[in-house]
Amino acid sequence: MRIHLKRGGIVFFAAVFFFFLAVGLCIGLFVWRGRPFATVELSGRYYFLVRDCESATAGAIAGESYFSGGAGYLLEEEDAVALACYYSEADAAFVEGTMSAKGVEVRVLEREAKPFSVSGKCAENAARIRDNAATVDSLARLLFDTANNLERVAVTQEEARAALTGVVQGLSGLASDNGEGVFSLWNLELRRAARKGKELREGILFAKDLRYLQIQLLLSVLSLPEYFS
């Protein structure tokens, strides 16, 4: 008799447990489905000119690339070092061919900024997230143009420094206007890039330094979903 009562009690409590579990899941599903969703529309293709490397030689390849005139930006996930980034596949292919002819082994790494979904508070700020990406992309393009003009001696150091100052102010202003909340992690990235720009601004400007910051900005745009997941 006691055994039957004991078993009956276990069955009863198990039934109660699963009942409340089912109710909790239903409530959770209802709340989840009630959260706002939105798509952050991104577009853009970037063509990184890179040299492949192994983890053991990454630092050496990055340093060698920098002293040879490239950005020397280490792409750890790709086991490669970025020398530059172009917005046209034809431009990237032309430089690749030129460098290959000189005996420098490089390749073009294509990356695309794609739309991604956000929910909750991020969904409410989807338009602003998109505008942030567009602004950072435009600042990166300014660095790209300035680097090219600096190589051609089409701008002075003062003019290049003024352009870099504009980029720094743009990044800092963007972070300030965003506020915190859902933008807290992204703002850290913007301020990190702004600090890099300030450091570069203190010395003589070279095209490779501007390309380094350009690549840093474009990689942040490509990684945007990670800041708002």
Image: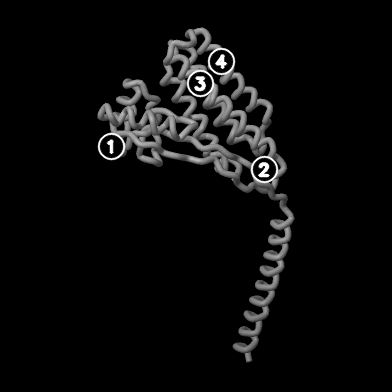
Tell which tag, 4 or 2, sits nearer the viewer.
4
Label 1 is placed on what type of residue? Ala
Closer mark to the observer between disc 4 and disc 3: 3
Q: What residue is drawn where x is 40% and y is 25%? A: 71
Q: Residue at x 69, y 74 (%)?
A: 16
CB atoms of marks 1 and 2 within 8 Å = no
The answer for how far apart the CA atoms under marks 4 and 3 are is: 14 Å
* Mark drawn on residue 145: 3
Earlier sequence position, callout 1 versus callout 3: 1
Q: Residues within 10 Å of mark 3 (few under 14, many from 20)?
A: some
For the N terminus, which image quadrant?
A: bottom right
Instruction: In the rendered structure, find residue 9 and report the number of the disc placed on it.
Output: none
Residue type pointed to by label 3: Asp
- Local secondary structure at mark 1: loop
Dot 1: few (<14), some (14–19), or many (≥20) neighbours within 10 Å? few
Residue occupied by mark 4: 165
Question: Answer yes or no: do the residues labelled 4 and 3 have beta carbons within 8 Å?
Answer: no
SS at circle 3: helix
Residue 221 percent location from the top left of the image? 55, 35
Pointer 2 and pointer 3: residues touching (CB < 8 Å)?
Answer: no
Find the distance from the CA under tag 1 to the CA under tag 4: 36 Å
The answer to whether 224 appears left or right of 204 in the picture is right
Label 2 or label 3, whichever lies nearer to me, is 3
Q: Earlier in the sequence, mark 4 or mark 3?
A: 3
Return the x and y of residue 142 as percentages of the image width and height. Answer: 54, 22
Give, as a three-letter code, the residue at label 2: Cys
Q: Look at mark 1 in the image and give the residue it sits on.
A: 56
Residue of label 2: 122
